[in-house]
Image: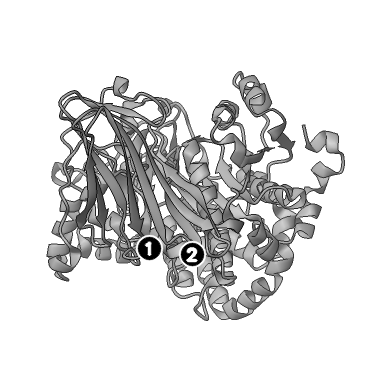
Amino acid sequence: MTTTRLLMRQIMPVDRDTDVFPLYVDLEEATLDADRYAVGGNKAAKDLNNAAIRQSTSTGRKLHPDQIRSRTSVRLEPLQQLSFGTYFNAFPASYWRRHTVVTDVTLTVRLTGPGSVVTVYKSMARGHAQRVDGGVVEGESGTFSFDLSLKPFVDGGWYWYDVVAGDDGCTVESGEWVAGVPDDRAEHGTADICITTMNRPDFCARLLAQLGEDEVLAPHLDTVMVMEQGSDVVADSEFFPAAEKALGERLRVIVQGNLGGSGGYARGQLESLRKGTATYALMMDDDVVCEPEGVIRAVTFGDLAKRPTIVGGHMFNLYNRTQLHSFGEVVQPWRFWWQTRLDGYSQWDFASRNLRSSRWLHKRADVDFNGWFMCLIPRVVIEEIGLSLPLFIKWDDSEYGLRAQRAGFPTVSFPGAAVWHIPWTDKNDGVDWQSYFHHRNRLIAALLHSPYERGGRIVRESFNHQVKHLASLQYSTAELRHRAMVDVLDGPHALHEVLATKLPEVNAFRKQFTDAQLHIDRDELPPVRRKKPPKKGKADIEIPGRLSTLIAAGLAPIRQLRPLRPMSRDYPEAELASMDSAWFNLVKYDSAVVSMNDGASVALYRRDPQRYRDLLRRTVGIHRRFHAEWPRLARQYRAALTDVTSPEAWDKTFEPWTRDPEVGDD
């Protein structure tokens, strides 16, 4: 016996923001880029093709906001053509084919407007579009249903429909994708939304209100939990009363110390697990704008998955709202570093090149993990593999995806489910206090999951990066990375012990280094002066070629041993914008004023040969030790993983805030 379930419906932007229209509807033509197999293996040809793929095909056409009639309907002007082959409205057939029990779908489109035409298309993994079926409105309105098989989508492909208005215009009233599913899959699941917040009260409160005010989403929500870890609390936001009213008894604010993202999400996972009333726990950042329909789609996809599956959403740039951060991420096993899959592109702008014109978007993107800015985890997965590792920040989500994958639970980054997030490009997390957590947690994740006996390239790459930071005068970063490696040697059980104290310790330690002392006012630092002007008046700032880069990399460590130029102790030799502060520029100077990525402050970098020698000596020593002890450390961390991520271990960590319920929960 089967029951019909709604898989997806046609939607329009909640706020009628014209900036996001290309994610919902498309007025542009389809101009498909070249097949990479036709381009071949020649490097010059591939480079040229990659540049061409990034070229915009947009003519700038947009709907008028008044054409959006409702959340599900849109009005077309006479003879206007509109495609629903877009991120939020195309049907990701290959994902349903690969991961769910669904084998066939029915598309129903309702149109008003005589003479209007609807045409259904499909694409294959290589991006080629094929006409499937169509219909014409013969009276004032028409309802068209199309039975569509998922059989030909084993490697990739989408379904979508285009509409051409008649002489009197057209209103696309609705579009729905439904399927017959087994009776035991008839009821939809519910999600506990787990939001970790730290001093972003207004952002978080607006997100809560957005979740609570969507009536269609409401039946899919169990509890919305906010793990409050800051001093500027969400309950004090002017937007919180509206959120509290919208969510009512479904809202729960849990107060605890700053345990980072992993401590916040682990608390949400634990509370959801113990409560046991929701099918899923959905991790969500506090600094996002949500597409509520995406939550429903993630729950629906999870309900119909063949096996318990982690369903992640994608991340769009909050400040460039049609730009997608990544369509699917993997952990490269030899380097053990996260990245967009090799046949994909990051920072993709759908306003410049639409879905139908982007061949690479039609191949299904299989992933190792999904970021916890939006990630739906089945409760049964948490029961089986445990909670987050106590890593504070960084690598908790990717490690969890790898852990789940090893236990037989896949992760799907699901098209059509997304949030808009503050971009990471404006952060300095590779060299600031976060560098400690980046490095420590990457090593821990590799010890747990690297398939190579000594972690592949990770120890060697760690050494190279350490030398690069030393040559770039980033002594605070180099010291933090060194401390990270020392702490990894303390073993896995120390992670819980230091979770609440490590950040204050890191920040206190950094204060002694000038490269970590940030100045809001540039005039607090001396002006630029140098004894010798640039050679032949040429700019110091340049992007070297490959040969020049190799030469610079070889000479940079040696240069650090030379005596300081006389004036460099009193005056910086240069002032570098953040975008120009790459290592191959920094290594030229004995001192420099460097601006931070967020544009809000500057720091003074000073070369210190004595510190350089000391750090280089310790760097060599600890990397030799890691190379020698990697197999033993890997066995130690893997043996302890179940215990460290258990609810019982986390209970002890949360005890200071759970001992007295009135302190830990509002």
Residues 589 and 91: in front is 91
Please tell me whether residue 211 is drawn above or below residue 30 in the rendered image. above
Q: Residue at x 43, y 31 (%)?
A: 600
Residues 173 and 81: in front is 173
Q: Which residue is mark 1?
A: 557
Please tell me whether residue 524 is drawn above or below residue 1 in the rendered image. above
Residue 482 horizontal side relative to residue 141, left or right: right
Residues 87 and 94: in front is 94
What quarter of the picture does the N terminus occupy? bottom right
Q: Give yes or no for contact between labels 2 and 1 (Cβ–Cβ under 8 Å).
A: yes
Residue neighbourhood size for the residue with mark 1, other residues' Cα within 10 Å, grouped as few (<14), some (14–19), many (≥20): some
Q: Which residue is mark 2?
A: 616
Disc 2 from disc 1: Cα separation: 9 Å
Considering every residue shown, the one lying at the far right of the view is: 660
Tag 1 secondary structure: helix
Does residue 467 appear anywhere in the picture? no
From the top left corner, tell me how far across and down residue 226 is, in percent. 66, 37
Q: Residue at x 49, y 79 (%)?
A: 452
Q: Residue at x 61, y 58 (%)?
A: 184
Does residue 398 appear anywhere in the picture? yes
Query: What is the three-letter code of the residue carrying label 1?
Result: Pro
From the top left corner, tell me how far across and down residue 328 is, in percent. 40, 56
From the top left corner, tell me how far across and down residue 358 is, in percent. 23, 52
Query: What is the three-letter code of the residue carrying label 2?
Result: Leu
Residues 427 and 219: in front is 219
